[in-house]
Amino acid sequence: MSSEENLLSPPPVEETGGGPTHFEWSAPAFSYRVRLSFDVVDDLGFEVMRGFGAIPRRGAEVGGVLTGQVDEQARIIEINGFAPVACKHRRGPSYVLEDDERAVLAETLAGVEAGGQKAVGFYRSNTRDAFHLDAEDLELLEQFFQHEPGLCLLIKPYPTRVSEAVFFHRVEGVWEPAAGGAAFPFRRSSLGGGKRPRRRRAVDDLPPAAVESPPQAAGQAAKEPPEPAPLRAQPDFKPIVVPDVPEFAEARPSRLHGSWVWIPLSFIFLLLGIVLGFQIALSVSRSHKAAEQHADPYSLELTAVEFGESLHLKWNSSLPAFRNAASAVLQIQDGNNTKTVEITREDISRGGILYKHASPQVRFRLEVPQSAHSSVTETLDVRVMAPDRQPEDLRRGQGSSPLQ
């Protein structure tokens, strides 16, 4: 699918009144005013709710590119469309793009520019507990949305009330929640746009008889319509010949005979399907058990990568050591300073945290409790490279061992 096919442009509508067409938003720390089209609110809200209903309980997050124009003189950002970028959710319901999906995002951005629009920001739905940009979000924004002014729109859907949204803006290279993180309702009527205009069919699409009335004959009174012409028989009319149908008593034995043949066959096919399904499920279960047996029960697979002025610490949350862990403890030795961080279950499932270091020598020690008397721990020493050096391979942990 090309990037042009991903762009969403709302169908033409005819407004029933002269009401407002956009919602204007501004924040004290942001020097631009944002004009958000009500059609975008309608269509984007539908996309968010469709993803929210795709997966039970939490719902799947969706995301993409906000398109529009930027008026530098008037300091106005117009958002009049959006281009969704699909996520296969390989890491769960959160919107986290892999390398192939990021390539699609790059193609989408190029298609937006080629179409005469501008990528004015990034959006995603937020099915998490709070409005927050995770390490994956910041990494994506730094890679594709470094331009100023920068906008990021998070939309949080709810099953029984109006969705809410928060703008994040880029100020001096840092992404911060605008207006102190105050949320606004993400619905046309709640933002002062009234009801959505009624969509009508264009006149050009109607048949000619519905657009033009037949001309009146010369000398005919306008108030009396002409008398209808009498119906005439068609010269080439041919009667429909109905073929002979056999008697009901003759056809009944053959139908009964065929149905009795299919009853035992259907039962045999049903049994074969049950046996094959059981064998497939058994083989899949064995393969899963074999994979779990080969996985190292004392490994956490700690890695770290530099991210701006911070370190992105990662672990493999699918390993056996994390399976039943409700929490973990992370000890960080940053130069001469030592701190302890409590890692929640949600942080474990995300597979990493972002840490802003103060010295070039940092040691991470992650301890994951397994029971009341044992735990698995792994240590990772990271030396931050100088700005003039080239990136190196990621360093892995120095082994893992159970603590008794």
Image (cartoon, rainbow, N blue to C red):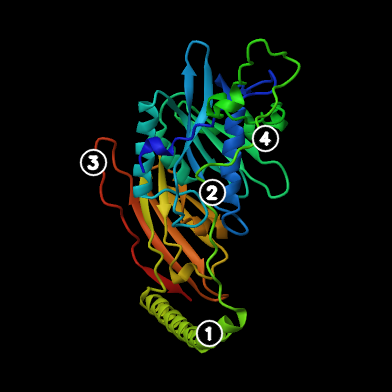
Cα distance in 3D space between marks 2 and 3: 35 Å
Residue of label 1: 254
In primary-sequence order, the first of circles 1 and 2 is: 2
Asked which quadrant contains residue 188, the reply is: top right
The amino acid beneath tag 2 is: Glu
Cα distance in 3D space between marks 3 and 1: 82 Å
The amino acid beneath tag 3 is: Gln
Give above or below for 31 relative to 229.
above
The amino acid beneath tag 4 is: Arg
In this rendering, the label closer to the viewer, 4 or 1 = 1
The residue located at (54%, 48%) in the rendering is: 61
User: Where residue 113 sits: x, y (%)?
Assistant: 37, 27
User: Where residue 267 sits: x, y (%)?
Assistant: 52, 87
* Horizontal side of residue 398 vs 347, given as left or right: left
The residue located at (38%, 50%) in the rendering is: 98
Residue of label 3: 390
Task: Assign the N terminus to one quadrant of the image.
Answer: top left
Residue of label 2: 61
